[in-house]
Every structure is written in C-alpha cells, then in structure tokens.
Image (tube, grey):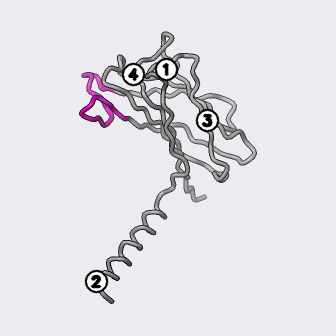
Amino acid sequence: MSASMYKYLLISLCSVLVSCTSNTVYHHYNRINDNEWKKTDTIYFILHDSIEEGTYATKIGIRHTIDYPYRDLWLSISLPNKKETDTIHINLANERGNWNGSGTASGYYQYETEGPTLNYKLHSDSIIKVWHIMKGGTVQSITDLGIKLTKNNIIH
C-alpha cells in the first residue's frame, strides 16, 4: 500500500472513532433579542423527532458580554415529561469578579453548566422551556442561551 492509502485509511478510522464516541443528540443555541432578556420571555428548544426514548444529561450554555452586571444568573427550566420545573443557579463570575467561562478579545464570554436529567419518552412533549428568575424585569447583556442533550449509558 502506498503512503497516501495509509493516510486515507488512518483519517477514515479516526473519523469513525470520533463519530462513535459522541453521545450528543441535541445541541442548540437561541439568540436573545437585542441582548435584553425580559422576565416574560421564555426561550423554547424544540427537540427533534429522531431523539430516542431514554435518559439524557443536560447542559445549559450561556453566552454574555463583559457588560453583564451580575456575578450569577438564576433560571427555571421545564423539561418534557416532568411536572415540576427545575431551578438552576449559574455562577458566571467568581468572588473577585473574574468571569468563569471562556472569553474572547472582543468582550464575549461563554459558560456551560450541568442541568437537570431528562427522562425522555416518545409520547411526551418535545419542548424544553427556559426563563430567567432574576429580580427586576429585564436582564441585560445575555446574548444566547443553549441546551445540550447527551445520552446517558447507564448499566443496570
């Protein structure tokens, strides 16, 4: 076999291995209009019909600017097939005011945290709803909110 054939086989094998190791079934960000998240604005994530029944770990992603005026963010999240909503407290900055997420030179930051477990059933609603529960009417400088679902491989 030629060197180019080995290279092709190696790249193909790596591609297969990488595609088989990802358990992420949904990953989406929604833009916050004008970076002003009103208390009455609910962010909706509509799950794909192709998502199978099962248990999924969720991650909540927040993108914000350097102008975000608080250290933290409080969210409520409503998951399909669950009667109660979950409350999530996200610490976006530490006690000294340094942002916990990764940032860019242009003043944008991204932070991701663990969310509640989703026990998804095919006959259930397929919408995840998220809204902020901060004091006051509007939260400034949040640019995007994201949800990531990862299939849990629980062995019983």
Q: Residue at x 48, y 32 (%)?
A: 145
Mark 4: amino acid:
Ser
Tell me if 153 is positioned left or right of 82 in this view: left
Q: Is residue 107 magenta?
A: yes
Q: How far apart are the alpha carbons under marks 2 and 1?
A: 55 Å
Among the two numbered marks 1 and 3 on one chain, the one whose residue lies closer to the N terminus? 1
Mark 2: amino acid:
Ala
Q: Which residue is mark 4?
A: 141
Mark on residue 37? 1
Q: Which residue is mark 3?
A: 128
* Disc 1, SS: strand
Among the two numbered marks 2 and 1 on one chain, the one whose residue lies closer to the N terminus? 2
Viewer-side residue, 16 vs 80 = 16
Mark 1: amino acid:
Trp
Q: Which residues are magenta?
A: 93-110
Q: Residue furthest bottom?
A: 1
Mark on residue 47? none
Q: How far apart are the alpha carbons under marks 4 and 1?
A: 8 Å
Which quadrant does the N terminus fall into? bottom left
Viewer-side residue, 121 vs 139 = 139
Asked if marks 4 and 3 touch (Cβ < 8 Å), the reply is: no
Q: Is residue 28 magenta?
A: no
Asked if marks 2 and 4 touch (Cβ < 8 Å), the reply is: no
Tell me if 26 is positioned left or right of 71 in this view: right
Q: Residue at x 61, y 49 (%)?
A: 55
Among the two numbered marks 2 and 4 on one chain, the one whose residue lies closer to the N terminus? 2
Q: Which residue is mark 2?
A: 3
